[in-house]
Image (cartoon, coloured by chain):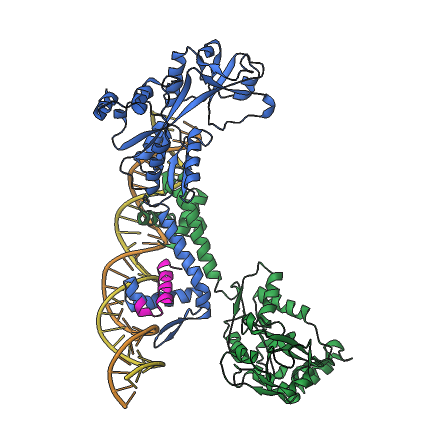
Chain colours: A green, B blue, C yellow, D orange
Amino acid sequence: MNVEAVRAFVAVADEGQFQLAAAHLGISQQAVSKRIATLEASLGTVLFKRTATGAALTRDGRTFLPHAKAILTAVSEAFGSVQPQTRPLRVDVLSRRIASAELLRAFHRENPTLPIEMVTSSGAGATIQSLLAGEIDAGYVYLRGLASELDPRLDRSYAYLEPLHVIVGEQHPLAGSRSVRAAELARFRAWVPGIVSGSEWEAFYLELAEVFTIDIDPTGTESLFDTIADSRLLLTFVGAKSRVAWPGHLGLARIPVVAPTPLYPWSLIWHSGTRHQGARRLIAHVKQVFEPPEIDQVWLPQQARDDLRWHRWPPAHPDALQTTMRD
Amino acid sequence: MNVEAVRAFVAVADEGQFQLAAAHLGISQQAVSKRIATLEASLGTVLFKRTATGAALTRDGRTFLPHAKAILTAVSEAFGSVQPQTRPLRVDVLSRRIASAELLRAFHRENPTLPIEMVTSSGAGATIQSLLAGEIDAGYVYLRGLASELDPRLDRSYAYLEPLHVIVGEQHPLAGSRSVRAAELARFRAWVPGIVSGSEWEAFYLELAEVFTIDIDPTGTESLFDTIADSRLLLTFVGAKSRVAWPGHLGLARIPVVAPTPLYPWSLIWHSGTRHQGARRLIAHVKQVFEPPEIDQVWLPQQARDDLRWHRWPPAHPDALQTTMRD
DNA sequence: AGTACTCCACAACCGTTGGTTGTCGAGCAT
DNA sequence: ATGCTCGACAACCAACGGTTGTGGAGTACT
C-alpha cells in the first residue's frame, strides 16, 4: 500500500472525479487512474464506481475513507515530529527528579497543548553538545563559567535559584531542627555520592565546601539513604524542589539550610537562532518567572553572585553591566 | 514517505541492527540500508547512529518511532477495513428508524466491541443484490417467497415478528381506545404513502388489506402526519418498534391492533458461506432470541404462517418440515 | 434521435525507484 | 595484531510510476 495512492484516493473521494483530483494533486488524470487501480488491486476490492460524470464511492470505499484519512494524518504527524520547526519541544533537565524537571512541568501546566519531550543527559557539557547538534531545543543547567565563555551560538538566562536542604537520620543531632545554619554544617560530614569528576555540580559542591569548611565525600555508590539513616555524623544535600524519595521507615528528616541559604543556580540555555515557537515561549516564560535573590540572605557560587548582583538594583548605566560581566 | 521504509525503520529499531531486520523482513541488508537512508533523506534527519555492533536510535529516531508504529497500525487497520474476513460487520436494515435497526442495536449492545456498520437500502431486492455482490454481510428483510425460492447462495432465519400499531388524530373515533380489533379497521381508510410498487411491504399491506377488507391508499408523499392529525377517517400503520416521530402539538395517538395482531415478519438473510465471525455471531444471536408466535392470536402473511406453524410444536419427524416448506 | 462533450481506461514509452549481488572500510573482541 | 561482524557503496536490472496519445461509454443538449 502506497501513501501517494492513498492520498489520491482521498483526493478523488473529496473531489468526486479523477480529473479534479489530478489537477489538485498536480499530476495527470491517467496517473490518478493508475494509482487508484493499483490501490484497489492491493486491497482486493473496488473503491469507486466509475460513471460518465465522475467517480462515486462504493460501500468499501466509504468504509475505507476514514482509515485513509487516518493514514495521511499519521504520516503528516510522523513527518512533523522530526522537523526542527514543528517537532515537540525537547528540553534537557538532567534528571526527572530534580528542580529542572519541576520547572519544565510548571511550564507544561501553563501550556498544556504544547507537545514537550523531557530529555535527560549527563551534565551541562552533554547538554551543550546536544544543543549544538540540534538534537534538543533547550536545557536547564548550572553554568559556572563567565557569560563570555559560553559558545557564541548559544544564549542563556537564569531560571531558578534552588535552596538546598540537608537530609539526616533519626538519631542525628540535627534531626529535630526546623532549620540549620550553614556554618553549623562544618561539624558534620556530607556524603554526596554520584558526583562526576569535572561536572558542574562537583564545582558547586567544592566551592560550597570550601567556603563553609564542610567535609564533603563524593565517593561510593551504595544505598545512600540506608547509610544516612543509621549515622549520627553523615548528612547529604538535596535541592528544595527535588523529588528524591526514600522508604518511610528510615525516618529521615529534611531540613532547610539558612543564614545564608545556599542556592543552586539553574540557567536555561538554548540555541541563539532557534526558530522553534515552543522554545521561544519557554524562554519568555523563564525570563518572566525568574526571581532574583535578596543577595545578602543567600549564598551563591561567586560567578553566579557576580552575574546576579545587578538584577535587583541595576546600575545607572546599562553599559556598566556588560563591563562587569566580562571582567 | 514510503510505508515499506517505515516498516524497515520499525524493524531495525526493534531488532537493533540492520541485518536482523533484513532477515525479519525477508530482504537483503543492503535493501534495508537503502530504505533507511531514503527515509532519513526525506525526513531531513538521521534516525540511527550506526556502530560496528548494530544501530542505535538517535533522539530524532526515538521521537519518530511511536509515530512510525502509528502509521503501520493505521495502514493495517485500513487494509483490514475492506477485507471480507475482518472488516466491520455490515448489516442492511432498510431504514434506521424501524424495527430492524432496533434489533441490530440490541445485538450491538450485547457485543459492544464488534465493529458494526448499519447500512440502509431500498428493499429486499436491493439487499439480496448487495449480499450476492459481497457488499454486505447480512440484512433484515421481509421475505415473502417460499424458502426454496431464495437464491441458493443465501440463507435465512426468522428474526422478529413486529406487531402493528395504527396512528390516528385527536378527533378520530379511535383516539381514546387502548387497542383496536383488526376487524374494526374496515370502517376507516388507511393511508400508507411511500409504498414502492413491487416491494415486499406493498405485498404485506395488500394481503393485510384483503384479509381484513381495509381500504389502503398508497399514493402521495405529502406530510403524512399533518393530514392524519386533521382527519376523522384516515389512519396509518406503523411498526411497534419503529421510531417514527411527529411534532407533539399534532396530538396523534398510537394504538395497538389486536385480535388478531398483524405481525410484520422480519427475517435475517446472509450469504450461506460467510466467513465473517461477526456475521456468524449475529446469526446465532438472531436464532437464539427469536420467539415464535402464539399462532392463533396473531395474523401473518400466509406464507410466513406456513413457515412458522411448526416452530412451536414441531412435527414428530423432522423430515416432514422440509416437505411442508417445499410444497 | 443524433451529436457533441465529459469522464475514465488502456497502450506505449521512459526515467526513477528499489531490489539484487559483490565488495570495502570501520570498529569491537579475542 | 588479527579476525569477525556490521553497515555503506557500486554496479546492475526489473519493476514501478509518471508522461502523452487514444478510445469507449455514458450524459446532456439540440
**A289 shown above or below D27:** below
Predominant secondary structure in magenta? helix
Please tell me whether residue B171 belongs to the stretch shown in magenta: no
The residue shown at (34%, 77%) is: B52
**A104 shown above or below A122:** above
Residue A318 or A67: which is nearer the viewer? A67
| Direction from residue B108 to residue A284 in the image, left or right | right
View extreme (right): residue: A316
The residue shown at (39%, 64%) is: B39
Residue A142 location in percent, x, y? 60, 79
- Residue B86 seen in render: yes
The residue shown at (55%, 12%) is: B173
View extreme (top): residue: B187
| Direction from residue A15 to residue B251 in the image, left or right | right
Q: Residue C2 is drawn in which quadrant? A: top left
Residue B118 location in percent, x, y? 42, 37
Write down the region rendered in magenta.
B1-20
Q: Residue C1 is drawn in which quadrant? A: top left
| Direction from residue B279 to residue A286 in the image, left or right | right
The total number of labels drawn is 0
- Residue A22 seen in render: no
Residue A255 or B189: which is nearer the viewer? A255
| Direction from residue B316 to residue B71 in the image, left or right | right
**B70 shown above or below A100:** above
Residue B59 location in percent, x, y? 46, 70
- What is the quadrant of the C terminus of chain A in the image? bottom right
The residue shown at (53%, 76%) is: A127
Please tell me whether residue B15 belongs to the stretch shown in magenta: yes
Residue A10 or B23: which is nearer the viewer? B23
Residue D26 location in percent, x, y? 35, 33
